[in-house]
């Protein structure tokens, strides 16, 4: 009787780029950052243009899973409140869909598209 020797799940995940912080995770994180852009408030452009994905500007080699907007006021803009706790009024001239909690806005509107792009990436062998 013959037998089949299978690779460990870790080897399979690594080969497919599915391991934690692997190339599929990096692609997913970068794709989310790109899709979030139109939901990020844009006045002078500084906030939207200084997004960092794990210490790398978007569209460069992503190392892990964190998207950060580097400006010191980013938390206020994200939460929709000024330092004084007053609601912010966002300009919609450059980013008509911008507002607070832009990650949630993107997920609500575009998660199916993001998932398709990631699946296409996987289907192409991570290329």
Image: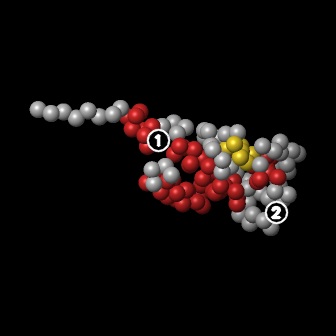
In the image: residue 13, left or right of residue 57: left
Q: CA distance from mark 2 to mark 1?
A: 39 Å
In the image: residue 29, left or right of residue 69: left
Image location of residue 116, percent across then percent down: 49, 58
Residue occupying image coordinates x 63% and y 44% = 61
Image location of residue 127, percent across then percent down: 51, 52
The residue closer to the viewer here, 91 or 19, is: 19
Q: Is residue 119 above or below residue 74?
A: below
Q: Counting other residues with Cα less than 10 Å from the Cα at mark 1, is it few (<14), some (14-19), or many (20 or more)? A: some
Query: Which residue is identified by label 2?
Result: 91
The numbered disc on residue 73 is: none
Q: Earlier in the sequence, mark 2 or mark 1?
A: 1
Image location of residue 7, percent across then percent down: 33, 34
Q: Counting other residues with Cα less than 10 Å from the Cα at mark 2, is it few (<14), some (14-19), or many (20 or more)? A: some
The residue closer to the viewer here, 125 or 19, is: 125
Query: Which residue is identified by label 1?
Result: 18
Q: Secondary structure at mark 2?
A: loop
What's the colour scheme? secondary structure
Q: Can I make out residue 80 in this image?
A: no
Residue occupying image coordinates x 54% and y 60% = 113
Q: Is residue 33 above or below residue 19?
A: below
Residue occupying image coordinates x 70% and y 57% = 37
- Give the position of the N terminus as an image quadrant: top left
Asked if disc 2 and disc 1 are in contact, CB closer than 8 Å, the reply is no
Q: Secondary structure at mark 1?
A: loop
The total of numbered circles placed on residues is 2
């Amino acid at each position: 009787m013959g037998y089949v020797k299978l690779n460990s799940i870790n080897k399979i995940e690594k080969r497919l780029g599915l391991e934690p912080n692997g190339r599929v995770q990096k692609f997913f994180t970068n794709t989310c950052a790109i899709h979030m852009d139109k939901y990020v408030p844009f006045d002078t452009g500084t906030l939207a243009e200084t997004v960092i994905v794990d210490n790398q500007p978007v569209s460069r080699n992503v190392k892990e899973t964190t998207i950060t907007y580097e400006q010191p006021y980013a938390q206020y803009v994200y939460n929709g409140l000024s330092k004084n706790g007053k609601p912010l009024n966002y300009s919609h001239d450059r980013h008509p869909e911008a507002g607070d909690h832009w990650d949630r806005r993107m997920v609500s509107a575009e998660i199916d598209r993001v998932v398709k792009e990631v699946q296409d990436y996987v289907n192409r062998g991570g290329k």
